[in-house]
């Protein structure tokens, strides 16, 4: 079994010891991360919290700013119950270091910045940084492992693929995506990039283009499943017979990340470089499924996280204090979603006993509903009460649901679960979100240990932060190399 290079909290002597502890802590607080915000009032989740937590979380000592600070920085008032302070400390202490520690060569950064100008078509600033950093790492791993082909899985529009294939480091790439539409879009952008590289600006900048280089990037449509290692290896061998090859992916979604790692483990691929994403789309062990996205490793065998908790792993609490107004607005939206869900259940309008899930209501949809609210019935309502009545109208209109509560019904519901309910929702959501990084650590460690189990004793497995967690919350990269 290969050694896993990972920066653990100080007191842990091995990854296996750390894995056991985060699993134990997760199971202790699992009820928090599995809380479904939509059912908050229906199930009476608030009463599941310790009484001393409830008393503090709705007191004057714990306002919205305090909750945001608690989630973003781990700061909590000294007057808070010790059991609550212990929970917050534990959630922060057990996190892996999500700050990028990659050395910065400023001259190299400037050179790459100029070169990447030719590849920026269609990329937002966040994507530009991610592609630049990951492509540099893939090129490094390819050179160390003597790979002459990169298989980019979940290539999408081909942003990473084009930089890998056409930048000065130039690594042949097989770009795979399951969507015909994505492939067509990627090929169109590929032609635009080639046109730029043939142009006078590229020549003046010292970029020497040869039309034979266009063949270094091949796009193909293929569905990569959890048990599709053989087909993936076959496609790689057909593209470059006898070549040493690696797998890579930028924000491969859910089970696709697990599929990439399983393909590495079950094939002759020399290396894998992967930034996972969308943890809420990871499958877990069920009786009718033998192949799942979690757990993969022996260390996590038998562990189960749950779909609501997997969604929690997608939370980016590091962003909360950077945009507190947006965070409070999210609290308010969750509050209104939960209130509307309560009204739907209480009025027994759900077909087959299953209430329709209220998704995101846009600002424009909400504004339209505000203008449609009748003046009668809302004249004596507060601004928050009228806002909920508008939200209910907008949400049910979006669902195309026949039932419409009156404004008076909405106002009565809000008055029963008003400001106190909002504070409760905000507090519960904060407690839930605090567990998100711990759940991500469980997934990262499970995957790293799985790679170590299939990398050979001389192999090398690393996991570290590649991007800034504020701009790119899913910033952890997994790297494995066979020797």
Image (cartoon, rainbow, N blue to C red):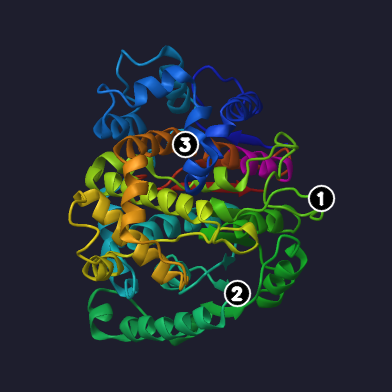
Q: Is 409 or 136 nearer to us in this picture?
A: 409
Q: Is 125 or 420 nearer to us in this picture?
A: 420
Answer with mark 2 or mark 3, whichever residue precedes in sequence: 2
- Relative horizontal placement of residue 265, taking residue 341 as reference (left or right): right
Question: How far, Cα to Cα, is label 2 from label 1?
Answer: 27 Å
Disc 1 target residue: 287
Answer with mark 2 or mark 1, whichever residue precedes in sequence: 2
Q: Is residue 446 magenta?
A: yes
Q: Is 166 or 294 nearer to us in this picture?
A: 294
Q: Nearer the viewer, mark 2 or mark 3?
A: 3
Q: Is 82 or 147 nearer to us in this picture?
A: 82
Question: How far, Cα to Cα, is label 1 from label 3?
Answer: 28 Å
Q: Secondary structure at mark 1?
A: loop
Q: Quadrant of the N terminus?
A: top right
Q: Is residue 192 magenta?
A: no
Badge count: 3
| Residue 373 locus on image (x, y percent) | 25, 66
Q: Residues within 10 Å of mark 2 (few under 14, many from 20)?
A: some
Disc 2 target residue: 178
Question: Which residue appears at 22% of the width and 78% of the height?
Answer: 204
| Residue 354 locus on image (x, y percent) | 61, 58
Q: Secondary structure at mark 2?
A: loop
Answer with mark 1 or mark 3, whichever residue precedes in sequence: 1
* Type of secondary structure dominating the magenta stretch: helix
Kindly tell me whether residue 270 is visible in this rendering.
Answer: no
Which mark, residue 312?
A: none
Disc 3 target residue: 432
Region of the chain picked out in magenta, as a range: 445-454
Question: Which residue appears at 20% of the width and 48% of the height?
Answer: 382
């Amino acid at each position: 079994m290969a050694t896993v290079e990972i920066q653990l909290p100080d007191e842990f002597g091995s990854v296996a010891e750390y894995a056991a502890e985060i699993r134990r802590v997760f199971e202790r607080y699992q009820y928090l991360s599995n809380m479904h915000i939509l059912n908050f009032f229906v199930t009476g989740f608030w009463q599941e919290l310790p009484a001393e937590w409830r008393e503090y979380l709705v007191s004057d000592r714990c306002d919205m700013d305090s909750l945001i600070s608690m989630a973003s920085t781990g700061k909590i008032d000294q007057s808070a119950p010790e059991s609550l302070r212990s929970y917050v400390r534990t959630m922060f202490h057990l996190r892996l270091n999500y700050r990028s520690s990659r050395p910065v060569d400023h001259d190299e950064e400037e050179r790459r910045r100029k070169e990447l100008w030719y590849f920026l078509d269609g990329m937002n600033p966040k994507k530009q940084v991610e592609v630049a950093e990951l492509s540099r790492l893939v090129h490094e791993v390819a050179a160390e492992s003597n790979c002459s082909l990169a298989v980019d899985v979940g290539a999408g529009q081909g942003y990473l693929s084009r930089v890998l294939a056409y930048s000065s480091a130039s690594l042949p790439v097989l770009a795979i995506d399951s969507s015909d539409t994505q492939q067509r879009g990627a090929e169109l952008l590929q032609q635009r990039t080639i046109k730029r590289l043939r142009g006078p600006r590229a020549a003046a900048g010292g970029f020497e283009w040869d039309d034979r280089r266009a063949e270094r990037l091949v796009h193909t449509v293929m569905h990569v499943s959890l048990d599709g290692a053989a087909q993936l290896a076959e496609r790689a061998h057909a593209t470059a017979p006898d070549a040493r090859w690696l797998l890579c992916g930028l924000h491969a979604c859910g089970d696709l990340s697990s599929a990439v790692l399983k393909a590495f483990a079950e094939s002759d691929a020399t290396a894998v470089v992967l930034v996972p994403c969308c943890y809420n789309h990871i499958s877990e062990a069920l009786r009718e499924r033998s192949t799942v996205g979690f757990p993969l490793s022996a260390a996590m065998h038998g562990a189960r996280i749950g779909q609501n908790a997997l969604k929690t792993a997608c939370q980016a609490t590091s962003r909360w204090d950077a945009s507190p107004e947006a965070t409070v607005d999210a609290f308010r939206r969750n509050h209104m979603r939960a209130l509307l869900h309560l009204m739907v259940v209480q009025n027994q309008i759900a077909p087959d006993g299953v209430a329709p899930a209220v998704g995101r209501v846009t600002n424009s949809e909400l504004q339209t509903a505000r203008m449609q609210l009748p003046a009668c019935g809302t004249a004596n309502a507060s601004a928050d009460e009228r806002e909920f009545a508008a939200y209910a109208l907008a949400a049910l209109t979006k669902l195309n649901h026949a039932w419409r509560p009156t404004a008076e019904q909405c106002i009565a519901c809000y008055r029963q679960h008003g400001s106190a309910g909002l504070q409760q929702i905000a507090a519960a959501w904060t407690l839930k979100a605090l567990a998100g990084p711990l759940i991500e650590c469980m997934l990262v460690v499970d995957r790293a240990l799985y790679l170590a189990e299939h990398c050979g004793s001389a192999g090398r497995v690393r996991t570290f932060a590649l991007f800034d967690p504020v701009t790119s919350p899913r910033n952890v990269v997994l790297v494995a190399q066979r020797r």
